[in-house]
Image: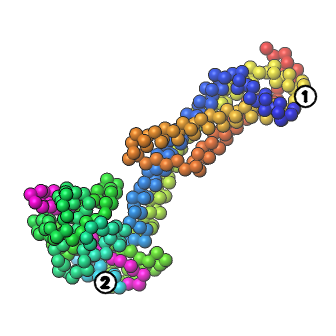
Amino acid sequence: MLLADLLRLTTSSFLAYRMRSFLTGLGIAIGITAVILLTSIGEGLHQFVLAEFSQFGTNLITIQPGKAQTQGGSVGIFGSVRTISIDDAQALRHLRDIQFVNPSVTGNAELRFGGRTRRATVFGAGHNLPKVMASSVALGSFLPDDDPVQPRALVVLGSKVRQELFAGQNPLGNYLRVGGQRYRVVGVMEPKGQMLGFDLDDTVFIPAARALELFNRPGLMEIQVSYTPNASLDSVLRSITALLKERHGREDFTLIPQEKALEVLGSVLDVITFAVGALGGISLLVGGVGILTIMTMAVTERTAEIGLLRALGAREGQVLTLFLGEAILLSALGGLAGLGLGVGIAQALHGLFPALPVHTPWVFAVLAELSAISIGLVAGVAPARRAARLDPVEALHAE
């Protein structure tokens, strides 16, 4: 049997049984659509979350008070946690491979200006915060390098606070009351947007020492440290740990490298994306069962045709290839239709809901199509082998 004849026989069955072929391919198409749609949303969320956490850079280490690991037994009076201080932050600035250090305190306070009142997040920070957090100043300047213990009462506005309290006027030089205390406005930050629902623009920035006094806190909430990109993370962690242990007498703090946190988060999100895709893959299995059923019926209906092909000299392998080709073609066409439908629905959802992150990598599309073809191949094996093993004489007498 020539290849052209084999292809013609394979495609002729689609024309002869159009509705049956359409419904069979539809099962595969729905499965591929579900896989593409779910994995597109999953991958979109994956990239969105990683982008949110990495917008401040990856060469960042956060230092928090308290040890993350639980120690066995009570240590009595020695169990009290020592807070991290502004002096700790100052000492960290002199370590090798450390670029910038930012002491951090966060709270919420009432802001007042010109008869307008608004509650907003207040960040107590150092003068290096824009460099540590990859932020930019839109107007004026950030907090200066003042005395870290007794800094001047200066404030930098987030873009939303500036719009709400100083609409239509230049805020620089004006005095803003933060929690009842007067602060002179020296700058306005560039819009930063939201991070996981937290509005980074609805904020003001004051010196960390002033924030400790405002919120009546004994110590910093955390210290952010940025290190040189080509430095060894393990070496930087060891030097920070050694310095703080020397200052505190023991390891009563926790270091959280952004790089390792992103790796763990990425692994978790990969598992979630795979699980979501696997749920959609169940629909593919249903489509495979449909191909198996249809191909089994096709062998029964075309028994006489198979007998005629064998009588004309077609070998078992050629008959096997014929029916496997039909199964693969059905699944491949259904898969292509599903790809188009899945990508179309995903983009339509993104158009209707712009906040919904959607991303369809070409690798997912190729894997989905290969999965459809593989399922068609597996589902068509049993009917094709049955067709190939029919006795030619008995098949010719079949009605």
Q: Are marks 2 and 1 in contact (CB under 8 Å)?
A: no
Q: Is residue 104 magenta?
A: yes
Residue 151 position (above or below residue 179): below
* Percent position of residue 326, x then y: 72, 31
Image quadrant holding the N terminus, namely top right
Specify the quadrant of the image occupied by residue 372.
top right
* Direction from residue 79 to residue 55 in the image, left or right: right
* Percent position of residue 140, x then y: 25, 70
* Direction from residue 127 to residue 256 in the image, left or right: right
Q: Disc 1 on helix, strand or loop?
A: loop
**Magenta residues?**
95-121
Nearer to me, 82 or 198: 198
* Percent position of residue 311, x then y: 89, 24
Q: Disc 2 on helix, strand or loop?
A: helix
Q: Is residue 224 magenta?
A: no
User: Does residue 193 appear in this view?
Assistant: yes
What residue is disc 2 on?
91
Residue type, mark 1 in image: Gly
The colour scheme of the drawn protein is rainbow
Which class describes the residues within 10 Å of circle 1: few (<14), some (14-19), or many (20+)? few
- Please give the label number shown on residue 313: 1
Residue furthest to the top in view is 399
Image quadrant holding the C terminus, namely top right
Q: Residue at x 60, y 43 (%)?
A: 368
* Percent position of residue 312, x then y: 90, 25
Q: Residue at x 50, y 52 (%)?
A: 271
- Please give the label number shown on residue 282: none
Q: Residue at x 10, y 65 (%)?
A: 180
Nearer to me, 41 or 181: 181
* Direction from residue 153 to residue 36 in the image, left or right: right
Residue type, mark 2 in image: Ala
